[in-house]
């Protein structure tokens, strides 16, 4: 017994493991108490009918079945997909281009970078309140600018056609700086030798961009896209502050609908089911991306 | 050199090299013109985008200083005359915004300290130590990134109720002392860039891993800590849903929540709402200015190379 | 007295609040050291377990929504000065999140003792035993309910087995009785165009004729001005048009939506036509943060009377209110009216003290103060008639007294258990028709079936 005890403590591997468990202990506790537990509890609620005031009443898969027949649910899926497709590709490409521009050894890099980052540090609530004002149809700055250019203004947030694009434009504006900073970091991580060698070989700028920059930047691009998709599927505050999901559900997103069902109409069971569907969508998309990355992400440097 | 600054010497060198290479090809003048033209276009692009980023924020400040009569007029006035600094005084009269700012700072600082501590600890274990279940636990931790906040909201509410935490700042601070996936990921990425030789050397000197963590890795990871710190601070400062659900009394509210009190009524006062928005982003911008060198460096060093 | 109201309320600064608070605090200390103060002026029943025996003041948690935090603070301070044995602890939330907060707090067993209440949620809270009937207190103290607008009282009643308010025990004592149908007009615009100001002869048809005079769209697509603004605001905004056609939105027992009946259909069609066919009304905006009337862009607006304190800050033009235009056929100009109430929750320990606060706020000194500084539409008729609906009112709206008779005759809108949800559906379908995403036929069909589904679910949940 004593021998085994000594062996246990004597073993470096065991000691290392114990120290490691001590270091990750808070995280494990947090994971169980603040995440795993609530996630399971929520799963239970998604099988009940519950208005917060009475007791949850078990009703099996009813919420999920009702969900599949709920036209509003499908509208919110469509709107959220529209938002993700509107923000992620445009936001990523714009951020990449601007990062490359900023990486051209320009003067006052810090100034530009700071300015681009300002919207990122501002809260979505503050930003939404600001853009609500900018999009105002008659006095808003956006329409005044359009009229200055000779266009007719658009009733941005009152139009079923333009309300979602308006939110998309604002969100791209809000998040651009974040991706730019990450792309700049990625670009600066690419060794200069590659470019110098290519220059000696007589490669054009286009060649260098497509054969060096894009492949070597792909891990960063992957990171940016994955996180952007996870975040944009959870879009809420913009719709909450600016449009309340309107007009005529044009900006009603999954999380807004979830909020409405759960915290405005107090259908907690239904809202939990919605939350789980959202969770499953995000997990599926993320897994798909991890599988798909093998085809386009290059990890060797 | 720091990743953030343009380096004039290297700049000049590159130009010289590029010039030498191309001079033999299409002729120096053509190159110069192309080069200058390109630079002009480049700066034009950067300035236009910069204006797009900056103007709405300036408009926010401008509106916050306007007399109510100046707000709905055409063409718009950029410079309020005279600036109504009284709007800010009024804002602090209407709601205790000073207290809101204090609460927000207090919560954000505690959350940041908690996140830095717990994430760096766990990240060190994941980056540099071997133990059974490491990859599995790390994968589980990372996968929590995908959980929408609303999924856990209701059960958390019940939990905090049972703990007697409702109405206090505890639900907004304590969980940060128990780690978060993004922070652990970020710190782990950074730790992976620290040479393994340092660990080996310290082991030979008789340090255990926990000592290596706080004697070597923690001091070396200032940029990553700054990055994580800024992200956590930002996230806490801008959090709406948490304070909305967990705080009850006016005395304990945060700035972001206070802002929704301002917008919550029909016929809101635009100059006051925008003043509130300015107050809500000002401290965070100041903080970003102070920490940005470390922050940018941290992002660069974490590499995010997977 | 009335003349000063608006300006007084505007200038009650934080400093004066602090002053009042400090005085109150001082008084409380003295009161605590001196003999125990009487529990109330209203003659508290002897059997109450009054807390005056102890030196410690009773602490009550009071929840309300809103913005007027500093004025509420002064109000509460005044109460505590008058009742040193009671200490109020305020819990404030914005309107948009108030119910979320109340329900989650209740679910957590953390509900306040006293909560301000809206008819939207009366049934939901009463049927889950969150609010308690106030009738025993009313009987005990001999409160004369005829001093209140009748509709304000009935709106607060709820009976087991009903999914709507209107009968049974009084769960929410009325603080406010007011309307979503207040007609405002911009005097300057009428003067500029030389159009006579609106009066009792106006009908729905007049709205079209006059509205067209005021609607001017610029070449660049921006609106110079519009005839009228009738913001889409749930079925509340629909109600008065429907009432004036002689119809109703729900059947008696709230089992189905009657929107497809001829009268409500006429009203719905009319609302859509104002925007699209006659083009005299502003197209709907999803967010009503920008008030077109306040910014001088519409000649006429129909909105909640709660806009009056907000409009009182208008400096650029003169304005007033007028009688609702009547329906040409039925000649009705009925308005819809709503109660705001205040309730005691079942988790309240000090119910007698809570009731003292309610009495003070709804019929005592607090009623006057509340009407002067926070919500100027008291449900208490003597307060309303002496303070608000006076013919000698000098600041706009000078014709506010018109509202008194309208409110007495108003159609009380009884609310079901899912009024918020139904209101949201009504907004969507109205907007869909106004923005021409759906035809009126489609929108009303969808409205009917969706509301019926919600009602069915509500009946099921409430009545088993």
Image: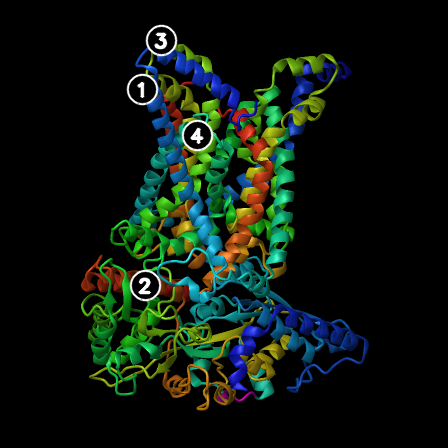
Residue wearing tag 2:
C427
C318 or A168: nearer the eye? C318
Mark 3 and mark 1: Cα distance apart in space: 21 Å
Q: Position of residue C436 (x, y in %)?
A: 21, 59
Comparing labels 3 and 1, the label whose residue is closer to the camera: 1
Residue wearing tag 3:
A201
C353 or C289: nearer the eye? C289
Mark 4 and mark 1: Cα distance apart in space: 24 Å
Which residue is drawn at the image coordinates 61% and 42% (left, top)?
B175
Mark 3 and mark 2: Cα distance apart in space: 66 Å
**Element at badge 2?**
helix
Which residue is drawn at the image coordinates 67% and 13% (left, top)?
B200
The chain identifier of the residue carrying mark 2 reads C
Mark 2 and mark 4: Cα distance apart in space: 47 Å
Residue wearing tag 4:
A102
Q: Are marks 4 and 3 in contact (CB under 8 Å)?
A: no
Q: Position of residue C421 (x, y in %)?
A: 37, 62
Q: Which residues are magenta?
A: C143-147
Mark 4 and mark 3: Cα distance apart in space: 25 Å
**Element at badge 4?**
helix
């Amino acid at each position: 017994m004593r021998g085994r005890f000594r062996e246990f403590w004597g073993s470096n591997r065991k000691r290392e493991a114990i120290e490691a468990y001590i270091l990750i202990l808070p995280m494990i506790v947090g994971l169980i108490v603040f995440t795993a537990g609530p996630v399971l509890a929520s799963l239970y609620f998604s099988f009940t009918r519950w208005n917060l005031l009475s007791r949850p009443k078990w009703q099996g898969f009813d919420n999920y079945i009702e969900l599949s027949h709920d036209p509003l649910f499908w509208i919110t899926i469509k709107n959220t997909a529209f938002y993700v497709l509107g923000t992620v590709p445009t936001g990523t490409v714009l951020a990449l281009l601007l990062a490359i521009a900023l990486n051209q050894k320009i003067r006052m890099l810090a100034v530009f970078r700071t300015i681009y980052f300002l919207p990122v540090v501002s809260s979505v609530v503050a930003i939404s309140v600001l853009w609500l004002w900018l999009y105002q149809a008659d006095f808003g700055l956006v329409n005044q600018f359009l009229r200055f250019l000779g266009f007719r203004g658009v009733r941005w947030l009152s139009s079923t056609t333009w309300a979602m694009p308006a939110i998309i434009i604002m969100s791209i504006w809000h998040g651009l700086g974040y991706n730019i900073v990450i792309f700049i970091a990625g670009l600066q991580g690419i060794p200069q030798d590659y470019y110098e060698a290519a220059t000696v070989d007589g490669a054009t700028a286009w060649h260098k961009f497509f054969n060096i920059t894009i492949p070597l930047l792909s891990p960063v691009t992957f990171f940016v896209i994955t996180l952007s998709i996870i975040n944009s599927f959870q879009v809420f505050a913009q719709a909450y502050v600016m449009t309340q999901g309107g007009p005529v559900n044009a900006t009603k997103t999954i999380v807004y609908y979830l909020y409405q069902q759960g915290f405005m109409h107090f259908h907690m069971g239904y809202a939990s089911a919605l939350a789980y569907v959202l969770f499953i969508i995000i997990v599926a998309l993320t897994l798909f991306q991890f599988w798909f990355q093998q085809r386009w992400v290059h990890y060797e440097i | 050199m720091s990743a953030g600054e343009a380096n004039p010497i290297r700049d000049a060198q590159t130009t010289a090299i590029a010039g030498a290479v191309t001079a033999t090809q299409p002729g120096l003048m053509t190159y110069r013109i192309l080069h200058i033209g390109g630079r002009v276009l480049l700066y034009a692009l950067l300035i236009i985008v910069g204006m797009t980023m900056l103007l709405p924020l300036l408009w926010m400040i401008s509106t916050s200083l306007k007399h109510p009569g100046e707000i709905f007029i055409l063409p718009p006035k950029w410079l309020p005359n005279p600036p109504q600094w009284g709007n800010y005084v009024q804002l602090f009269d209407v709601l205790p915004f000073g207290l809101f700012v204090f609460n927000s700072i207090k919560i954000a600082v505690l959350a940041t300290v908690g996140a830095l501590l717990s994430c760096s600890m766990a990240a060190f274990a994941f980056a540099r130590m071997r133990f059974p279940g490491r990859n599995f636990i790390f994968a589980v931790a990372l996968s929590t990134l995908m959980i929408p906040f609303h999924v856990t909201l209701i059960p958390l509410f019940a939990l905090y109720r049972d703990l007697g935490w409702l109405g206090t700042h505890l639900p907004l601070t304590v969980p940060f002392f128990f780690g978060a996936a993004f922070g652990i990921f970020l710190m782990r990425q950074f730790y992976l860039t620290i040479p393994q030789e340092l660990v080996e050397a310290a082991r030979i000197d008789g340090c255990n891993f926990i000592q290596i963590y706080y004697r070597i890795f923690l001091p070396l990871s200032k940029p990553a800590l700054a990055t994580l710190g800024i992200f956590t601070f930002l996230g806490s400062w801008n959090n709406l849903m948490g304070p909305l659900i967990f705080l009850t009394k006016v005395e304990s509210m945060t700035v972001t929540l206070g802002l929704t009190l301002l917008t919550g009524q029909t016929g809101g006062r635009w100059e006051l709402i925008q003043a509130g928005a300015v107050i809500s982003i000002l401290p965070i911008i100041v903080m970003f200015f102070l920490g940005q060198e470390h922050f940018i460096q941290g992002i660069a060093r974490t590499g995010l190379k997977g | 007295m009335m003349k000063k109201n608006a300006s007084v309320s505007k200038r009650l600064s934080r400093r004066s609040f602090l002053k009042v608070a400090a005085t109150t605090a001082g008084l409380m200390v003295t009161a605590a050291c001196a003999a125990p103060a009487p529990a109330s002026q209203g003659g508290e029943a002897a059997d109450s377990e009054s807390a005056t025996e102890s030196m410690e003041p009773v602490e009550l948690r009071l929840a309300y929504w809103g913005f007027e935090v500093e004025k509420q603070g002064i109000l509460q301070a005044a109460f505590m000065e008058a009742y040193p044995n009671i200490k109020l602890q305020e819990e404030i939330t914005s309107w948009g999140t108030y119910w979320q907060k109340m329900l989650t707090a209740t679910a957590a067993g953390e509900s306040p003792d006293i909560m301000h209440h809206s008819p939207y949620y009366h049934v939901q809270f009463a049927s889950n035993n969150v609010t308690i009937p106030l009738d025993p207190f009313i009987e005990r103290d001999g409160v004369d309910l005829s001093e209140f607008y009748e509709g304000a009282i009935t709106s607060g009643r709820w009976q087991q087995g009903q999914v709507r308010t209107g009968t049974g025990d009084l769960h929410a004592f009325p603080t406010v009785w007011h309307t979503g149908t207040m007609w405002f007009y911009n005097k300057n615009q009428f003067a500029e165009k030389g159009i006579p100001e609106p009066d009792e002869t106006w009908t729905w048809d007049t709205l079209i004729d006059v509205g067209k005079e005021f609607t001017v769209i610029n070449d660049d697509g921006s609106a110079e001005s519009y005839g009228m603004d009738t913001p889409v605001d749930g079925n509340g905004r629909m109600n008065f048009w429907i009432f004036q056609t002689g119809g109703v939105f729900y059947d008696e027992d709230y089992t189905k939506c009657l929107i497809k009946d001829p009268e409500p259909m006429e009203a719905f069609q009319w609302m859509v036509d104002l925007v699209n066919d006659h083009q005299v009304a502003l197209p709907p905006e999803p967010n009503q943060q920008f008030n077109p009337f306040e910014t001088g862009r519409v000649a006429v607006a129909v909105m909640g009377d709660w806009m009056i304190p907000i409009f009182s800050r208008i400096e650029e033009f003169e304005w007033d209110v007028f009688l609702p235009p009547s329906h040409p056929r039925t000649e009705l100009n009925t308005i819809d009216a709503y109660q705001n109430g205040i309730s005691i929750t079942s988790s309240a320990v000090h119910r007698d003290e809570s009731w003292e606060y309610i009495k003070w706020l709804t019929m005592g000194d607090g009623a006057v103060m509340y009407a002067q500084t926070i919500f100027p539409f008291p449900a208490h008729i003597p307060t309303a008639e002496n303070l608000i609906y006076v013919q000698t009112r000098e600041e706009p709206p000078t014709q506010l007294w018109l509202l008194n008779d309208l409110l007495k005759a108003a159609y009380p809108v009884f609310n079901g258990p899912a009024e918020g949800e139904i209101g949201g559906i009504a907004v969507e379908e109205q907007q869909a028709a106004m923005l021409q995403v759906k035809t009126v036929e489609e929108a009303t069909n969808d409205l009917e079936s969706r509301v019926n589904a919600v009602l069915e679910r509500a009946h099921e949940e409430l009545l088993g």
